[in-house]
Image: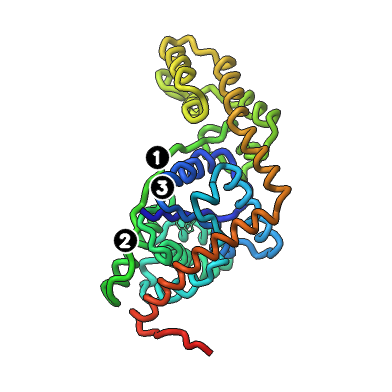
Amino acid sequence: MRIYSAIQPTGSIHLGNYVGAIMNWVKMQEEGECIYGIANYHALTAIKEPKKLEERVFEAALDLLACGLDPEKCSLFVQSHVPEVTELTWILSCCAPMGELNRMTQYKDKSAHMEIVNAGLFTYPVLMAADILLFKADTVPVGEDQLQHLEVARVFARRFNLMFGEVFPEPKPRLTKATRLMALNDPTKKMSKSVEGSAIMLSDPDSVILKHVKRAVTDAGPGAAQDQMSPGVANMFTLLKVFSAPETVKYFEEQYASGSLRYKELKDALGRDLVAALAPIRERRSELAAKPERIREILHESARRLRVIARQTIAEVREAAGLGVTPEF
Ligand code: TRP
């Protein structure tokens, strides 16, 4: 099994990203050959400040390694370090009908608010398909929001194989059992970095984590069904299930069922367990941050390994499509 996934380096990772995706990446390291990308070509569709883009790539690498990606067990790389992906993007885009891309809901949502829409945003799913297919990955862990893009990648693989001969395996999505974390201060909305006070960041000190939990909204708001768990309490149970011992979860579930749950007690337990889980990540993060050379080394080593696969695939693709080999000068 070859597993591929990537994230855009849009800033530091928060608790929602960790629970929703990264924990799963860490787990999958034991299941197959894992390739994880920091998608900076994708991020270029949005970020036009070179310094910022570079910093964010570095931050993403820091966060991912601190969360437990192990360079001995997976390849963590920066997308632009394997430029073959752009060549494959071009070739695939020549086989991609505009109509197919026009249907992408993420494109429609994002472009709706923009005055000028760059072509990269439109062909974003082609780059994503190239990303996956270049490494001939067969398993792609993604969240719900990327399923449509992955379906397109499957269509591209199938079409290419039909037109030019069998080159690509069809990548299958592995839908991460959606642990969707809501904002503690507004449990009707997804935890988001761009909303002030919404996200717990992995670099937050204990006091900040505890403050978030202490202030977590628990009441259901006006008009809510009385017999249902409020979104805020449900969200705390989601966190409890990830970070606390099964006995703790069971204890509070029983308390809730018997109508004697005390929010203060729940928050104290959750705060304690969250801090215990996040403190080592934060410590690892600051240790790594002090060794930028080591981070670079890890990323470069992965890229060197992956380019061997990338060149091999590109050679097959070129031959299949009638583009020939690059002459040696
Ligand atoms: N588009 C994905 C996102 O924004 C990131 C991504 C880029 C990706 N290439 C990928 C995800 C390949 C899975 C596979 O979340």
Residue depicted at x 37% and y 48%: 174
Q: Residue at x 54, y 40 (%)?
A: 16
Coordinates of residue 228 in the picture (x, y in percent): 41, 22
Q: Position of residue 258 (x, y in %)?
A: 42, 10
Kind of residue indicated by mark 2: Glu
Mark 1, residues whose alpha carbon is within 10 Å: few (<14), some, or many (≥20)?
few
Please tell me which residue is depicted at 67% across the width and 47% down the height of the picture: 288
The vertical placement of 225 against 313, above or below, is above
Which dot marks residue 123? none
Pick whichever, 259 or 220, lies toward us. 259
- Name the residue located 59 percent from the left edge and 47 percent from the top edge: 65
Q: Is residue 236 visible?
A: no
**Disc 3, SS:** helix
In this rendering, is residue 33 above or below 126? above
- How would you rate the neighbour count of disc 3 (Cα within 10 Å): few for under 14, some for 14-19, many for 20 or more? some
For label 1, the SS is loop
Q: CA distance from mark 2 to mark 3?
A: 18 Å
Q: Which residue is mark 1?
A: 177
Quadrant of the rendered image containing residue 277: top right
Q: How many dots with numbers?
A: 3
Q: Earlier in the sequence, mark 1 or mark 2?
A: 2
In the rendered image, which residue does mark 3 sit on? Answer: 144
Q: Of the residues shown, which amino acid type is indicated by label 3?
A: Glu
At label 1, which amino acid type do we have?
Lys
